[in-house]
Amino acid sequence: MSNLQSKTKGYLVVGSTKFQFYKFAINLVESIKDYHPEAKVCLVTEERFLDGREKIADDLLLCGSGVREKLWGMANSPYDLTFYIDADAEVIHEDIAKVWDELGDNDMVFTGLPEDRWYIFKDTKFPGGTFTLCGAVCLYDSSNQLVMEFMQDWHDYYVKQAERTWWPLNENGHFDFDLYPDRLGCWDQFTLWWLTEKVDKYKELKIGIFEDDLKWNYWALLDRIKHPMADDVVIHHLSCQADKGP
């Protein structure tokens, strides 16, 4: 990996499908700018949602209304180094400007899914495996061609997965719903797991987990007795049905 100082760096936020998600995305961009005024931010959204507030972003990509436009956005980042953040989150600490140091010699960095947090997630463990990476935030070297091929495959596989035109096969050549239950098909988390665990092409990628990963993705649903919220938490993830609305 070349010198990080010579690479363009920017944040990627996606708000599509519902106007509510666009509003979440604008709020997140504003919070990034509050704590890191010099930040470059790319907003990915639909043309029908534009209302002037999108001008706070430095770059704008117009996407479709597909099931996971976040993955399309990640595959089309305009920056050499990209930090993707789910729209239903807020930046709450100035250390956001230091996130680039977390990449180290990795190609991609995620937050983790340790067993002591499974109580807030669905379907983390299933007969064919266990999710270990959370796709809510992702720091990645978008100047790396293999990384960007990964992002494109993450999108393409997921679209086919959601349509049930792709799924892992059993020894009889049929969709293997015993090892990989059909209910997993709605999660891009499963696609992420499949690409990182089962696809040989991506075995050479260096994929890490943030050393202090709750700092970079503290879920509002966490039990604060089991998982106290530290003073230096950077990203407060507000994801829950009540927040997302109808």
Image (tube, rainbow, N blue to C red):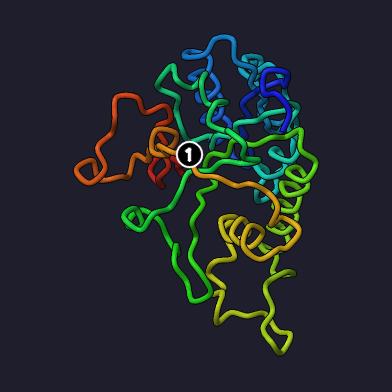
* Res 177 quadrant in image: bottom right
Q: Position of residue 75 (x, y in %)?
A: 74, 41
Q: Quadrant of the N terminus?
A: top right
Q: Secondary structure at mark 1?
A: loop
In depth, the one of 75 and 199 nearer the eye is 199
* Res 21 quadrant in image: top right
Which residue is farthest top?
A: 37
**Left or right: residue 219 compared with residue 199:** left
Q: Position of residue 133 (x, y in %)?
A: 51, 52
Residue at x-position 53% and y-position 69%: 183
In depth, the one of 196 and 3 nearer the eye is 3
Circle 1 residue:
210
Q: Position of residue 99 (x, y in %)?
A: 52, 26
Which residue is farthest left?
A: 225
Q: Position of residue 128 (x, y in %)?
A: 53, 74
Which residue is farthest bottom?
A: 172
Q: Against 17, is 99 above or below?
A: above
CA neighbours of label 1 inside 10 A, class few (<14), some (14 to 19), many (20+)? some
Q: Against 156, is 52 above or below?
A: above
Q: Count up the numbered dots.
A: 1
In depth, the one of 234 and 52 nearer the eye is 234
In depth, the one of 75 and 24 nearer the eye is 75
Residue at x-position 66% and y-position 66%: 198
Residue at x-position 75% and y-position 31%: 62
* Res 58 quadrant in image: top right
The amino acid sitting under disc 1 is: Phe
